[in-house]
Image (cartoon, rainbow, N blue to C red):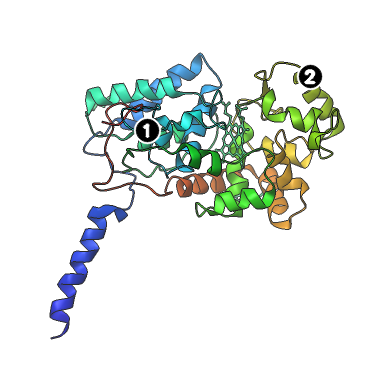
């Protein structure tokens, strides 16, 4: 039989693929090796967020900024290190002075190293804490897929190139998402993460005070009363680090008010409002659907988070399980 030789070979190559990293993530990955991983992460995050209501938003953003650069490999957590040849993504201008939540990730990592040393990757901690953050803030829960391994490198230039910017056009936003196999539905659903958290005046001052480089001009898509509010919060010549709520209606809860705000031209970033104001049918109709039906948004959001969590993961024997999320082993 001709097949006799080819079948074992085929089986072997399928097995090799698994070992070499095309392994699938699974929701029960730590069920025998670290069964309490979620319980531990949840209790530490819940405790820390009690004294800092913004923490859940900061932590969930880390997973996004991790997955968009080098894939979901914990690269965003690495401190710059000449000795290890690691460029810090933290210094990319989208991240510098902007990302937060590293301390609670360290705390969770330390607790996990105590109960199951060398088992849970930092990349997985980000995926787990993103879900916990959303659910603590009143949003959906989902089964987090696990089994990612940590990368040994970071890439600052890639962070600068890949992470979206407030003034990006809808075409650029769509392209930046599609480079990670994320489609228009993912773009709109995931942008709904701006239902909580803060933005610094630096990121919106051009939009409200200096649009298109013209002094005193504002983005015409901002609703006039809301423009006055934003200008009060971020006056010309004011502090660039002053904070503004991304969702003026319900700043700390994870709900679909973000989409209702867009319908009222009260999106804070250009990249938010453009989903509704560009009149591109596909994004406008998604905004309307999510604004009308919160369950629909929650379902789409959970689905897109799982998709984003699958971006270029390291699995099997690739990468490593970092002992300290800030440096390679
Ligand atoms: C669509 C393109 C996106 C752009 C242009 C964008 C841009 C920004 C900017 C400029 C800030 C404020 C940063 C600062 O002022 O320090 C911010 C905050 C935030 N972003 Fe996005 N973002 C986008 C998509 C996303 C996605 C997909 C997620 C998560 C799934 C996300 C989650 C967050 C969260 C939670 C905050 C608040 C963080 C805090 O309070 O510290 N963003 N984003
Ligand atoms: C998991 O946590 C529970 C409750 O905190 C504890 O009773 C149990 O011993 C823990 N299991 C492991 C394997 O650490
Ligand atoms: C809202 O969306 C959910 C989930 O997709 C669906 O089951 C439900 O029927 C929708 N409700 C309305 C009023 O359309």
* Viewer can see residue 135: no
Number of callouts = 2
Q: Which element is circle 1 on? A: loop
Q: Nearer the viewer, residue 63 or 27?
A: 63
Residue under pointer 1: 86
When asked about the image quadrant of residue 215, the answer is top right
Residue at the far bottom: name it.
1
Outermost residue on the top side: it is 51
Side of 197 where 152 appears, left or right: left
Is label 1 within 8 A of ligand 1 (CB to nearest ligand atom)?
no
At label 1, counting other C-alpha atoms closer than 10 Å, the crowd grade (few under 14, some 14-19, many 20 or more) is some
Quarter of the image for residue 184 reads bottom right
State the mark number for residue 235.
2
What is the number of the mark on residue 177? none
Look at the picture and state if 304 lies above or below 57: below
Q: Where is residue 79 in the image (x, y as percent from the top left)?
A: 40, 26
Q: Can residue 12 be seen in this view?
A: yes
**Looking at this view, is 54 or 13 the one in front?**
13
Q: Quadrant of the C terminus?
A: top left
Q: Which of marks 2 and 1 is nearer the N terminus?
A: 1
Secondary structure of the residue carrying tag 2 is loop
Residue 38 rendering spot, x and y as whole percentages: 35, 31
Marks 2,1: beta carbons within 8 A: no
How far apart marks 2 and 1 lie (CA) works out to 38 Å
């Amino acid at each position: 039989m001709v097949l006799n030789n080819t079948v074992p070979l085929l089986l072997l190559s399928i097995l090799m693929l698994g070992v070499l990293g095309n392994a699938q993530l699974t929701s029960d990955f730590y069920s025998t090796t670290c069964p309490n991983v979620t319980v531990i992460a949840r209790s530490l995050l819940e405790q820390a967020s009690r004294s800092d209501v913004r923490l859940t938003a900061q932590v969930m953003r880390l997973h996004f900024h991790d997955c968009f650069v080098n894939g979901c490999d914990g690269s965003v957590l690495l401190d710059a290190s000449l000795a290890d040849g690691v460029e810090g993504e933290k210094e990319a201008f989208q991240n510098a002075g902007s990302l937060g939540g590293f301390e609670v990730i360290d705390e969770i990592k330390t607790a996990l190293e105590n109960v199951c040393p060398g088992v849970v990757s930092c990349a997985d901690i980000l995926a787990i804490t993103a879900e916990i953050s959303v659910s603590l803030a009143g949003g959906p829960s989902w089964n987090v897929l696990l089994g990612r391994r940590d990368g040994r490198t970071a890439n600052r230039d890639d962070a600068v190139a890949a992470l979206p910017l407030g003034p990006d056009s809808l075409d650029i936003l769509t392209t930046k998402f599609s480079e990670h196999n994320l489609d228009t539905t993912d773009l709109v659903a995931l942008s709904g993460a701006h239902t909580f958290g803060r933005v610094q005046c630096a990121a919106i001052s051009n939009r409200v005070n200096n649009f298109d480089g013209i002094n005193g001009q504002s983005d015409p898509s901002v609703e006039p009363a809301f423009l006055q509010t934003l200008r009060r919060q971020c006056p010309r010549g004011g502090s660039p680090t002053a904070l503004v709520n991304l969702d003026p209606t319900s700043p700390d809860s994870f709900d679909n008010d973000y989409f209702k705000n867009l319908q009222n031209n009260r999106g804070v970033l250009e990249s938010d409002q453009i989903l509704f104001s560009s009149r591109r049918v596909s994004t406008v109709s998604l905004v309307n659907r999510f604004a009308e039906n919160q369950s629909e948004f929650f379902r789409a959001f959970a689905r897109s988070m799982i998709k984003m969590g699958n971006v270029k993961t390291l699995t099997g024997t690739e990468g490593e399980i970092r002992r300290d999320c800030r440096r390679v082993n």
